[in-house]
Image: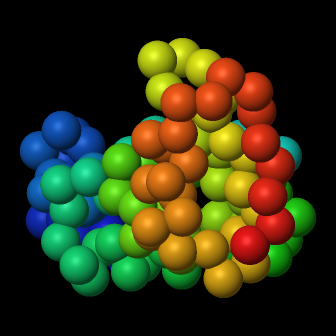
Amino acid sequence: MKIKTSSPELAIGRLSGGNQQKAILARCLLLNPRILILDEPTRGIDIGAKYEIYKLINQLVQQGIAVIVISSELPEVLGLSDRVLVMHEGRLKANLVNQHLTQEQVMEAALRSERHVEEHVV
């Protein structure tokens, strides 16, 4: 990962938002995880840093690491996920397999008032 810093001794909190995210992610990867849970991994960072993180996530998946992405950015979710779980008020509302899934289909599932969990291949 390309982390821009004036010194390797600089505290992570003094880096830019994108470099902070990349540094924390790099630190997590030192543990050789089998599962990685990322909560809003690109919130508040520039497009270049987002691209680097997306690229890294895809590489991790190719290496067999399971990655769970929690994001309020629907395009991000659709671009990174093979399955989308729609949650509302702590409850699972839909379990959607991402084969050409659209933002509209995810929003429709989120707004549906049915109480049972649905699984759809779209």
- Does residue 98 appear to the left or right of 14 in the view shown? right
Q: Quadrant of residue 75?
A: bottom left
Task: Determine the image quadrant of residue 99.
Answer: bottom right
Q: Residue at x 77, y 42 (%)?
A: 118
Q: Position of residue 59 (x, y in %)?
A: 69, 77
Left or right, residue 14 beside residue 58: left
Between 51 and 95, the one lying in front of the other is 95
Q: Is residue 90 above or below residue 70?
A: above
The residue under the point 65% across, 54% down is 84
Given residues 18 and 98, the one toward you in this image is 98
Asked whether 75 or 51 is in front, the reply is 75
Q: Is residue 68 left or right of residue 27?
A: right
> Looking at the image, is 107 positioned above or below residue 11?
below
Residue 61 appears in view: no
Q: How many marks?
A: 0
Is 94 left or right of 18, judged from the image as shown?
A: right
Q: What residue is at 49 percent from the left and 54 percent from the top?
A: 108
Residue 94 seen anywhere in this rendered image of the structure = yes
| Figure colour scheme | rainbow
Q: Residue furthest right?
A: 64
Quadrant assignment for the C terminus: bottom right
Q: Which x, y percent locates residue 17?
A: 18, 54
Q: Which residue is farthest top?
A: 90
x and y percent of residue 5 in the render? 19, 65
Give the residue displayed 81% in from the left and 76% down from the top: 62
In the image, residue 33 above or below residue 63: above
The x, y position of residue 54, in whole percent, is 49, 73
